[in-house]
Amino acid sequence: VLRHMNEGEYRQLMADVDYLSRTDAMIDPFEWVLGRVLHHHLAPQFDAERATRKRTATIAENRDAVAMLLTQIARAGHNDPSMQQAAFDAGAAVLDGEWQMVSPAQTTLPGLDKAVDALVLMLATEKKTVLEACAAAIAADREVTVTEGELLRGISDVLECPMPLLKAQST
């Protein structure tokens, strides 16, 4: 039914989703994922350029976007900064090179939107590696919260890449 909307109906739906997610003055991860998944699946029928963009980017070309995503994942499951850092480090261990968490002031949902937009254009093998890093960050504490699971599921969908298994990390 949603795919049969005209452009005006699509724009109204997205405005309504945005309005509803902001009514409590705070967008939680589920609300963000819902908006991103709807946008990802519906926008291409109204934006021909978006539907035909080449997907050839690499992790190396998108380090800031990868760091933003991994930071958001690490923070989603923990309030304690040391646990956030441990989760981030577990995810970064899957990736090549040295990685730093994005500062809390720079970790915003608009920033995450921009990061995911960049990651969509990566090669499939690169997306798989990024999602494996996210899964490692989530599983670092051997617990998967609903928020973490929803984020990974939604991001996997938007990146059009299968969600990796969440397995406990060995200590």
Image (cartoon, grey):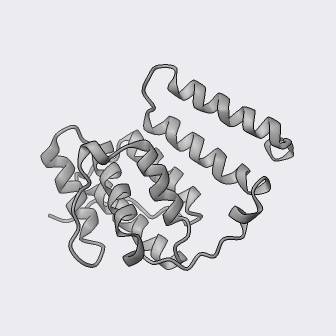
Query: Which quarter of the rendered picture does the C terminus lie within?
Result: bottom left
Residue 59 appears at what percent x and percent y?
A: 40, 75
Report the number of discs.
Answer: 0
Residue extending furthest toward the top: 24
Q: Is residue 14 above or below residue 23?
A: below
Residue 56 appears at what percent x and percent y?
A: 55, 80
Q: Is residue 48 above or below residue 128?
A: above
Quadrant of the image occupied by residue 104: top left
Image point (44%, 39%), residue name: 29
Query: Which quarter of the rendered picture does the N terminus lie within?
Result: top right
Nearer to me, 142 or 130: 130
Q: Is residue 138 left or right of residue 118?
A: left
Residue 10 appears at what percent x and percent y?
A: 76, 40
Q: Is residue 115 left or right of residue 91?
A: right
Image point (66%, 32%), residue name: 15
Quadrant of the image occupied by residue 6: top right
Quadrant of the image occupied by residue 90: bottom left
Q: Is residue 158 above or below residue 1?
A: below
Image point (23%, 67%), residue name: 99
Residue 102 appears at what percent x and percent y?
A: 26, 54
Q: Is residue 89 above or below residue 18?
A: below
